[in-house]
Image: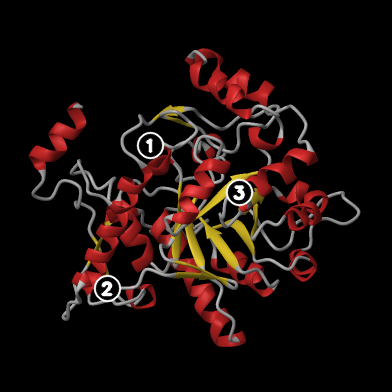
Amino acid sequence: MSVRVYKEMRRCYGFEEVAIVPGDVTVNPEQTSTDLVLGNLRFSIPILAAAMDAVVDPEFAVLFSKLGGLAVLNLEGVQARYEKPNEVLRGIIQAPVDRVASLMQQVYSEPIKERFVGERIQAIKQRGGICAVSVTPANTKRLASLIVEAGADVLVVQSTVTTARHMSKSAKGLVFSELCQSVPIPVVVGNCVSYGAALELMKTGISGLLAGVGPGATCTTRQVLGIGVPQVTATMDCAAARDDYFHESGRYVPVITDGGIHAGSDLCKALVAGADAVMLGAVLAQAEEAPGGGYHWGMSSPHPALPRGRRIKVETRAPLKQILFGPTTVSDGTQNLIGALQTAMGVCGAATIAQMHQVEMVIAPAIRTEGKSWQFQQACSQ
């Protein structure tokens, strides 16, 4: 008896299931370029710091900017709700495990103060930092003009899942094409994981796209909602949309893989999968300068009825500069991320990130344990 197939499912892949194939030609790592171009801005490292309260505050944003990357400040977090955000952060950090979720609901129920929005942006700009800020689609129209007026350099519109077409009872929701025309700064939008959604978003005029739903260290979207696509496949699908859109329009929209990157190997695999840059949260929350004090939590915490964010302990491990550029004191790939990237680029014969997109990658389901039984056993026991 034959059975009709109700749905066809394809196999998708995460970082631990693939490996990068070295090239036939190698390049001196010191001669590689890791530049990222976003709108009219150029960054020397292809890393964005995630818009999470435990990762980015104005001081961290300035430092990250001076080191060559772009830190995104969450304008719907404590920085825009409280006059003394550090006191609120300490409360979250010190809260007992059984009270964290309810405390976060309380903390993030405080209204956003428009004067703090301007003050935080100016605090970054006055100290010479490039300023990127994040808001959700629901608050974008209300805050966009204020963000531009305060001097922000990049506007990130971010939610768990973002599409170019959103149906609601609102008389008129956020229209990305109108937003891009009305603000004179690059607009980055996310998050999405599919070819179709990515292509439609790029056609609205955005300057960058965040790819990834559910893989973040503190994100519980997959557990609570069951939504998400493994990050390698999600990146490849969005990159395919980027390339097709570029061939069609002549306009290049960088894809930024957001979430699920725990070490230098994941960063390298994301770029081979087609990303132009990555957005990091938990790895950077381990920096001595991160405001989370060795803890990390997600952006979904404010939901009044379904608080999906989770506070995790990541420990404070090293200065930010060491995490990015070394010298590393650990062997797990969580430090000297740029050194790892440049070495991988050299081994693959890729002088630029665009050339990394052409590097071969293979399915390797046993990559974590293949020849690594002692390392794997020790890691599991720690």
Q: Is residue 366 left or right of residue 201?
A: left
Q: Quadrant of residue 359?
A: bottom left
* Residue toward you, 144 or 233: 144
Q: Quadrant of the C terminus?
A: top left
Check if mark 1's residue and mark 2's residue have beta carbons within 8 Å: no
Q: Quadrant of residue 348?
A: bottom left
Can you identify the residue that label 1 sits on? 286
Please tell me which of labels 1 and 2 falls first in the chain.
1
Q: Judging from the image, what secondary structure is the residue with disc 1 in? A: loop
Q: Judging from the image, what secondary structure is the residue with disc 2 in? A: loop
The amino acid beneath tag 3 is Ile
In this view, the mark in front (3 or 1) = 3
Please tell me which of labels 2 and 3 falls first in the chain.
3
Can you identify the residue that label 2 sits on? 360
Q: Position of residue 94 (x, y in %)?
A: 49, 16
The amino acid beneath tag 1 is Gln
Q: CA distance from mark 2 to mark 3?
A: 40 Å
Asked if 250 appears above or below 323 in the picture, the reply is: below
Q: Quadrant of the N terminus?
A: bottom left
Tag 3: Cα neighbours inside 10 Å, few (<14), some, or many (≥20)? many
In this view, the mark in front (1 or 2) = 1
* Residue toward you, 235 or 346: 346
Can you identify the residue that label 3 sits on? 124
Q: CA distance from mark 1 to mark 2?
A: 32 Å
